[in-house]
Image (cartoon, rainbow, N blue to C red):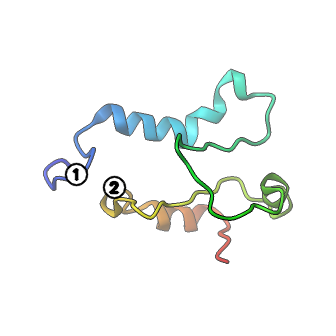
Amino acid sequence: MQNRNIIYGGSLPYRHMCRFQSGFFFRQRAMEEYDWYWRVEPGTNYYCDIDYDVFDFMQVNNYKYGFTMSLHEYKDTIPTLWEETKVHLFILTS
């Protein structure tokens, strides 16, 4: 990735942070008492109401993980994310 000038492509700390946030975070002792968590980046804005219980929806549908890509995602930083997600999870497409 670094040779292709992909943002953060040469940053090992950034890659570790991404891995931690997408998998190892929920295994921390402080999180043991929780069944669910919702990670929201600083400065995030919602432009519509969320009129349902997200955690209830995930439980009812047996979802384990969800993600949203921002409008300005760097596609080259996540080339395999979508295909891997489809292989391992049920996906809500609507």
Percent across and percent down for residue 42 are 53, 40
Q: Which mark is residue 26?
A: none
Q: Secondary structure at mark 1?
A: loop
Label 1 packing within 10 angstroms: few (<14), some (14-19), many (20+): few
Label 2: which residue? Answer: 77
Percent across and percent down for residue 31 are 72, 28
Residue at screen point 22% across, 40% down: 10
Percent across and percent down for residue 90 are 68, 67
- Corner quadrant of residue 57: bottom right
Q: The disc labelled 1 sits on which kind of residue?
A: Met
Q: Is residue 23 above or below residue 50?
A: above
Label 1, label 2: how many angstroms apart (C-alpha)?
8 Å
Q: Is there a contact, CB below 8 Å, between mark 1 and mark 2?
A: yes
| Residue closest to the far left | 3
Residue closest to the eye, 60 or 43? 43
Residue at screen point 81% across, 63% down: 51
Percent across and percent down for residue 70 are 48, 60
Left or right: 85 in relation to 55: left
Q: Which mark is residue 1?
A: 1
Left or right: 78 in relation to 42: left
Q: Secondary structure at mark 2?
A: helix
Q: The disc labelled 2 sits on which kind of residue?
A: Thr
